[in-house]
Image (tube, rainbow, N blue to C red):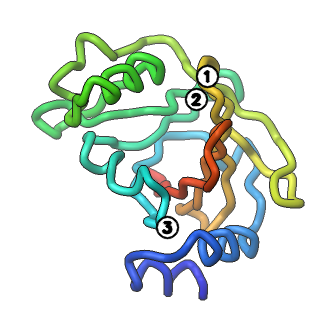
Amino acid sequence: MNFNEAINAEKVTQAQALQIFDKLASVDIEFILGTWNGSEFPSGHPNDGLLASSGWFGKRFIDRDTVDPLLYYTSDKEGFFAADPVFKAAASARGVTDISTIRSEVETFKPSARLRNIEFRGITTTAMIYDNRPIIDYFRKVDQNTVLGAMDCRGDDCTYFFILRRV
């Protein structure tokens, strides 16, 4: 199965997602700079569906040390804002689903992650390292405007997958 077949299927297994990810090319830091719109890549992870329902917009990579890992739509869906990952996680734990409803609690104007080249699954690629969460997102290139992300979270038995498309 390839990436496009997986998109058409609308859901894959963890094994299929890893196989697809492993076949994709690595990404360098310069390639990923900019703002990206995100969507989920359902693969049987317990968190499948949570980002979409929370109003997630995507990610913004300004430079290797300045990253907004969580962008959320504003309540009018006309724009987006950066959320602090720690405050967002606490809100989700309280049962908040639409992050725009608590924007004043979670919005940040400081970067919350950085980019580095790290080996993952045998290939060195660009990875986003959260500042205050035990999470690393690894990226592989689908095409010039699309990447597949794999979130590796300490203590998680499986990998969460997502798609980013260049804005």
Q: Which residue is mark 1?
A: 66
Residue 68, above or below 13: above
The three-letter code of the residue at mark 1 reads Thr
* Residue at horizontal 26 percent and vertical 41 percent from the top: 55
User: Within 10 Å of the Cα at label 2, are there few (<14), some (14-19), or many (20+) other Cα atoms?
Assistant: some
Q: Residue furthest left?
A: 76
Residue 61, above or below 91: below
Residue 64 in picture, x, y percent from top left: 71, 29
Tag 3–tag 2 contact (CB < 8 Å) = no
Mark 1 vs mark 3: in front: 3
Gap between marks 1 and 2, in whole Å? 5 Å
Q: Which mark is residue 43?
A: 3
* Residue at horizontal 56 percent and vertical 20 percent from the top: 112
Q: Which mark is residue 62?
A: 2
Query: Residue 7's quadrant in the figure?
Result: bottom left
Among numbered discs 3 and 2, the one appearing first in the sequence: 3
Gap between marks 1 and 3, in whole Å? 29 Å
Position of residue 89 in the picture relative to residue 126 (left or right)? left
Residue 40 in picture, x, y percent from top left: 41, 58
Position of residue 102 in the picture relative to residue 114 (left or right)? left
Q: Nearer the viewer, residue 86 or 93?
A: 93
Among numbered discs 1 and 3, the one appearing first in the sequence: 3
How many marks can you see?
3
The N terminus - image quarter: bottom right
* Helix, strand or loop under label 3: loop
The three-letter code of the residue at mark 2 reads Ile
Tag 1–tag 2 contact (CB < 8 Å) = yes
